[in-house]
Amino acid sequence: MKKVGVLALQGDFAAHGAALARAGAEPCFVREAAQLDGLDGLVIPGGESTTMLKLLHYDGLLDPLAEFARHKPVFGTCAGAILLAREVSNPAQESLALIDIDVERNAYGRQLDSRVTELETEPEFQLRTGPGKLEAVFIRAPIIRSIGPRANVLARYHGDPVLVEQDRHLVATFHPELTVDSRVHALFLEKL
């Protein structure tokens, strides 16, 4: 069974752990750099990206996380997607620049503008994970404003990319861990 870390500094890391277990992985909660050893992949959950970035610096995790991502798959959701993006705006902030996307923080609006919807997925997603719409929970979600040529869009919401992969990495601007559908986590496990 593959061991997948879930960054457990902030956000709903427990829900990601449960989703990974449903998808067939052994979740491990990561709070310090030494816990990255022996993992097959890592999930960076949602939360507040500025706070998460400060905690990564404070705990000395930013550089070890960047080194881990050079060799192993990383999946970022919502704030995690922001941290994996090449460029971040509204306001600009530091990131790991693992995926060739430009992200605008909180672009769908405030907490009151959060929503649950169904996404039409791209044929490639359905081919790899099975047919059917994908339930998506958006909470103060970022919008992917542009993608580079190596990034592959797997799902869109109102025309905007919301599920994107590039090589071994994956980002979702929504929260797949808050639904019973484990296809997005299973897709990530294929990369391990």
Image (tube, rainbow, N blue to C red):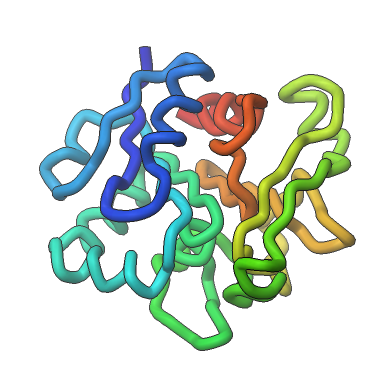
- Residue 158 position by quadrant: bottom right
The residue sitting at 43% across, 19% down in the picture is: 21
In depth, the one of 10 and 37 nearer the eye is 10
Residue appearing at x 71%, y 67% in the figure: 113
Q: Nearer the viewer, residue 117 or 162?
A: 117
Front residue of 129/52: it is 52
Q: Quadrant of residue 16?
A: top left
The quarter of the displayed image where residue 47 is located: bottom left
Q: Is residue 132 above or below residue 61?
A: above
Which residue sits at x=62%, y=77%?
A: 104
Q: Is residue 131 above or below residue 143?
A: above
25 lies left or right of 54: right
Above or below for 140 versus 157: below
Residue 122: x percent and y percent?
A: 85, 40
- Residue 140: percent from left, percent from top: 60, 66
Residue 110 placement (x, y as % from top left): 63, 73
Q: Is residue 159 left or right of residue 1?
A: right
